[in-house]
Amino acid sequence: MNPLIAMSVVAASAALVPLTSADTTVAPTAAEGTTPRLFSTPSKDLGSGYASSPDAIVQATGDAEGLHILAARESDGFSFYEIARLNRKGLSDVGPWTGYVCTTGSGNYAAAVYAPSAWSNQPGAYENGAFAAVIRLSDGKVTEVPDRVQLAYFTPGCGTGDEVAFTSSSATDKSAGSTTVTSVDAATGSVSSRRTVDGYLTHVTPTQKRTVGVLGGNLVDLKANGKKLSARKLAAVPGPMFALTASKNGTVDIGTVDGKSSVISRFDGGDFTELGRAPKGEVKLLPVADGAAVVGDVQGIDTSNAPGLSKHAVDGRVAGISRHGHLVTNSVFSEQMKGITKRIGSPSDKGAGSLTVKATALKTGAKATKLVDADLERPKPDSSPPIDPAAYTVAGDDDDDPRTCGEGGPETQCLSGSGAAVYGKVGEMESPCIVKRNDPKRQALQASANMVEWAVDQAVHGELKVSRPSNWHDTGLAAYTPQGLFPKPPLTGGGDIPAQVMLGIMAQESNFKQASWHSMNGDSGNVTRSDWYGNENGIHGYPNRAKADCGYGVAQVTTGMSEEHATQLDPLRAGAVTTDYAANIAAGLSILAEKWNQLKALGMNTNNGSPAYIENWYMALWGYNSGVYTSGSVGLGFFNNPINPRYPADRQPFLRYSYDDASHPGDWNYSEKIFGWAEVPQLTWDAEESYAEPNMPLGGVKAAPRDLFCDPSVNACNSAAADPCPSWDASCYWDRGVDWMGSQSTGNSSTEKLSYSLGSGEPELKSKYGHGPCIDHPSVYTNAIIVDDLGQHEDTYGCGDFEAADDGKFTLQAGDNITTLRDDGSFRATPYLAPIDLHQLGAGYDHHVYFTHSYEYTEPFHRVTGRWQVNQKKLPSGDQPGQRYKVYLHLPSHGAEAVVRYDFIPGDNTSGAKPDYCNVNQGTRSAGKDTWFEMGTFSFWKGGRIEADNIHKGGTGDDNVVFDAIAFVPFNSADPGACALVDGGL
């Protein structure tokens, strides 16, 4: 694990909503009216005695704000609140988060694993790259587990006590590798052991008698053997699995699949005994206090001879159950996961943090739905006044190199990662991606969903020929057409890629984002990127050129976009891929077409082999994600095989029944996810479907059966086993054609539906935010000297040339411009750290701002400093009277959030003028509009300037610090203004 990636956690206030052990003490209820109850009439809906009930529940769901850990007590009418929020502020531009949570046997603690959802697009990333934490439920205290772990539906493993098992796997498409089990004492958060066993170990769970898991298709007893684990077989698991729980007296209950049935069985020390069956996917097995519960369609399941296993009949989907079985959640998800993108700077925007809980009270059958605002019950930081003038003081040299960087270790450790050298020479920290970030000439315009759909409709049929004139959107590029640069790739045998297949890929890969996650429809900004810096998207770890992944834009185009590639795109094509969503889509088609053609060359047809049917792209999508092996052992690897045990065997089609599926995408293989997005469109920020549904005569896109690619005559795979192909190596590869559709026609197979006729013109941009005037002045002062964050305007939105650019100067400094080699061989190179969390956005004055995030003083390596100054020729020397200006600050309509200190530095003078400062709350002062804010008058001499940076007391890495324009109006009289600047009294 990289110790530099600090965990970001917001814990709930213990005074408001502690969740103590449900079996010992009833915690105080939340203040009346502070938290909306799930059930408005709890005595009726929950039954008498609810107010003294010890029952409680913990659930988790993710979005761009992090993995929200929600809790509720029956005594409060099951009023859900956020007890903790898990993310990594050290990761940049990663989009939504996903994860899983379990509650320990005592009910006092929860354990969670979490990671960016986008990592599910990277084969193997979920096996050993996720983060882990334990949460004390009495007060929300979060303790980080230092290991990187596996993120899968069967982790973490909570059992009957407070021991938690986290796993990490080295499995790849070529080997099952080994599994490391990290045992954690939830009460202390400390790691008690780390031990490894060969093979793919799943469902590790501590019971009252032993710690069990599933390895090679068998339930095994795991025991320490030095640094290794020994795995003694207890019993053969009777089929592919979807659940395992510890139950009473050391027994183990499991859920498996047999054909079209979900099967519940119990192990009591001898062998598994079947307890009954239900239609596949319509029953869940979940842990509760002192046992387990089977929930859903339980008519055919007999628990009378299974002490500790209760059963509850519930209609519809089941997400979780309370500890004492009084409440079942049917779904818990963030509205953002429907496709609604992250809010930017406006408190009225919804999406991230708006969580929908649907639940059923088991005593009465009452159902309820509640929208939970995850921010409502979170403790708020001390609110700073919008304006906070004070005497200017210097607390020391801000560029000092502190011995710690706010994370508890010596400075060399914080910068170099556990004392290791920092990736060699500084030159190796330069990203190899050929189009660099924060170049105003390479801003990506975030197209609205209608434009993306139009471009795909045209591109898949070779009609994306819209003319981009020379210098389109001020890029400086020559004129081109998207498919003039990137012609439609031919498919072996002819035909076209169905539009909804490509739309599904872009929904999963980038959420339709050409520009970064910070940019809303109509904004420009840096292009959506992969791990450009090779540091796992971290902002604390130095760039590692050798590991960089240069994926660009809505289609995540990688080929030819790195200096490390043997053949690189020329500047025109690379620039178009970066700035133009349409060119990016045109370039992205070639990757999918290549996989189709490779499979054709291997004789691996899907169904009747026609590209017109969406179902026939299943194997090409498999290869698109994890590759097609074309030499040696050929075919498709085991990672995306739907029989793979990392995917729950009872899963229903992705998204078909709920957007909740998008909150845990790792439960499905890549092809299933793309089919789901093709069938169920993402929604736009205004809750409209982003694209048309395909023609689906069967009511949905029919994915391949889970066991279709498992045949012992082809790939040494046993579909009836819990671990169908334990080696995960070449013997598991699939290299044959398949057919699950039979005789195909438009009457039984899904086909594309075009919303835009071929050859139609580019549709109008649907912008979320309006954009202010291109060039204006504060109040009536047309003589104002305006110093913008860009010295020369970049004409993204059709504005004219910037006026009087030579009258002032803006400079932006990332880090402290110091790069030194230490005695231990590591580097201090803050100019390579600070820019990682520096961004640009098409907002503010002349529609461009730079922004970063607010950090505490203990993190100076993320310092970004903006300096505004009038042309020095216009300022007097220090022995002359100063030039007084009335100063106005421009704030954008969106994107600004932090309280920022602006330092007024007069320059050297003999008049006795001293520096002063003013704290401005950028978010509240802008009030959702492009705003000129009058600060007051101040006198300047040569060397005079205004400075602001992002290092502030209480900075958490969350709030945006924006660098926009400042206007200097020559003024004769003193006016302290809102900032009460001391110059007003001179």
Image (tube, rainbow, N blue to C red):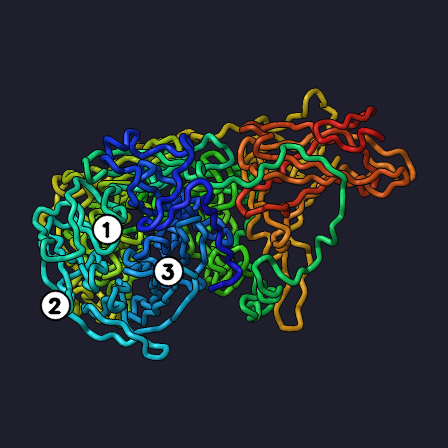
- Residue at the top extreme of this rendering: 780
Q: Nearer the viewer, residue 863 or 548?
A: 863
Instruction: Choose mark 2 or mark 1, whichever is in front.
Output: 2
Question: Which quarter of the figure is the C terminus placed in?
Answer: top right
Instruction: Choose mark 3 or mark 2, whichever is in front.
Output: 2
Residue 824's spot in the image, x, y percent?
A: 63, 73
| Distance from Cα at disc 2 to Cα at disc 1 | 42 Å
Residue 44's spot in the image, x, y percent?
A: 23, 30
Q: Residues within 10 Å of mark 3 (few under 14, many from 20)?
A: some
Q: Indicate the amino acid at tag 3.
A: Ala
Left or right of 529 on screen, residue 356: left
Which numbered disc flags the more N-terminal residue, 3 or 2? 3
Q: Residues within 10 Å of mark 1 (few under 14, many from 20)?
A: many
Residue 586's spot in the image, x, y percent?
A: 38, 46
Instruction: Give the residue at x 41% y 53%.
Output: 136
Tags 3 and 2 in contact by the CB under 8 Å rule?
Answer: no
Q: Nearer the viewer, residue 656 or 97?
A: 97
Which numbered disc flags the more N-terminal residue, 2 or 1? 2
Instruction: Give the residue at x 76% y 28%.
Output: 976
Q: According to the image, label 1 marks what residue?
A: 617
Instruction: Give the residue at x 56% y 59%.
Output: 407
Q: Secondary structure at mark 3?
A: helix
Tally of numbered tags: 3
Q: According to the image, label 2 marks what residue?
A: 271
Q: Indicate the amino acid at tag 2.
A: Asp
Q: Which mark is residue 125?
A: 3
Q: Nearer the viewer, residue 779 or 38?
A: 38
Left or right of 736 on screen, residue 684: right
Q: Which mark is residue 561?
A: none
| Distance from Cα at disc 3 to Cα at disc 2 | 35 Å
